[in-house]
Image (tube, rainbow, N blue to C red):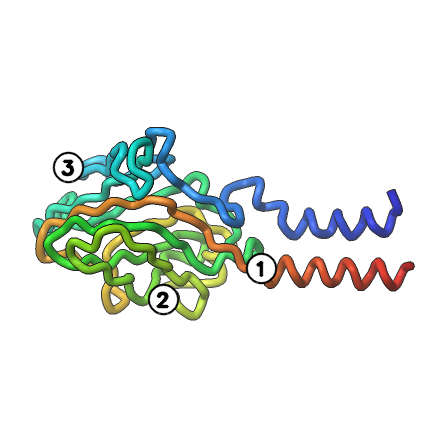
Amino acid sequence: MNRFVFSVLFSGSLLFGSQAFGVTLGQSDDFNDGTLQNWITGEINPNPPSNVADVGQGGVGDHVMHVLSNAEGGGPGAQPVVFNSTQWIGDYLVNGITAITLDINNLSAIPINPGIEIWGPGGSINTANGTTVPAGSGWTSITINIEPGNLVGGGVLATLADVEQIRFREIQGGAFVTPNAATSAYYDNVTAVPEPASLTLLGWSTCALLRRRG
């Protein structure tokens, strides 16, 4: 292989190599393997998430994650919280991930406002607000923006560069809140939305350099 071409490809592998260790562009949790795919909650939560079969938009064979809360003050299970410290860790900045999308069905009698909290070296950061999903919504798709400008808390860039855990939780006005009634919702197709600009830039740079060598 031409040494110049190899060096360009190697540089690209360094840029996107972190995808092999945790979060990757376009990854999606669909729960169809019958598990929660490493989404968990606190050990004393009386309402742990569960995998429910045949209730997704695809019908039979389409599994989902069921997330509950009991709205009992500030006690265990009062807030609908699930977190992942496995395949959703890593460098969101290098990977160009600017949002997380999911399909959600709010079965509750009240609206819910799912947002995202992110843990990392810069401390805990979170979306300024959750995305409101009306009561009895039926299946709907939402996008939760995790660009730096949409996050509040500690060192945003430091945490996004080395995410250790992400959490879905109820967020309003930049704060974590307890719903005023019990909640129940199905989550499905949790997806890391890719930012194509970085890939496009690398592609154009590679082409330009190869033309210059030609």
Label 1, residues with CA under 10 Å away: few <14, some 14-19, many ≥20: few
Residue located at (15% from left, 43% from top): 76
Residue 20 percent across, percent down from the top left: 58, 40
Q: Which mark is residue 46?
A: 3
* Badge 1 or badge 3: first in the primary sequence: 3
Does residue 184 appear anywhere in the picture?
A: yes
Residue 22, relative to residue 4: is it above or below? Answer: above
Which element carries disc 3, helix, strand or loop?
Answer: loop
Label 3, label 2: how far apart the Cα atoms are: 29 Å
Q: Amino acid at mark 2?
A: Val
> 198 or 44: nearer the eye?
198
Q: Which mark is residue 196?
A: 1
Label 1, label 3: how far apart the Cα atoms are: 41 Å
Q: Is residue 206 left or right of residue 96?
A: right
Q: Which residue is mark 2?
A: 152
Label 1 or label 2, whichever lies nearer to me, is: 1
Does residue 176 appear anywhere in the picture?
A: no
Residue 166 percent across, percent down from the top left: 37, 49
Which quarter of the image is occupied by the C terminus? bottom right
Q: Amino acid at mark 1?
A: Pro
Q: Which mark is residue 47?
A: none
Residue 154 percent across, percent down from the top left: 39, 63
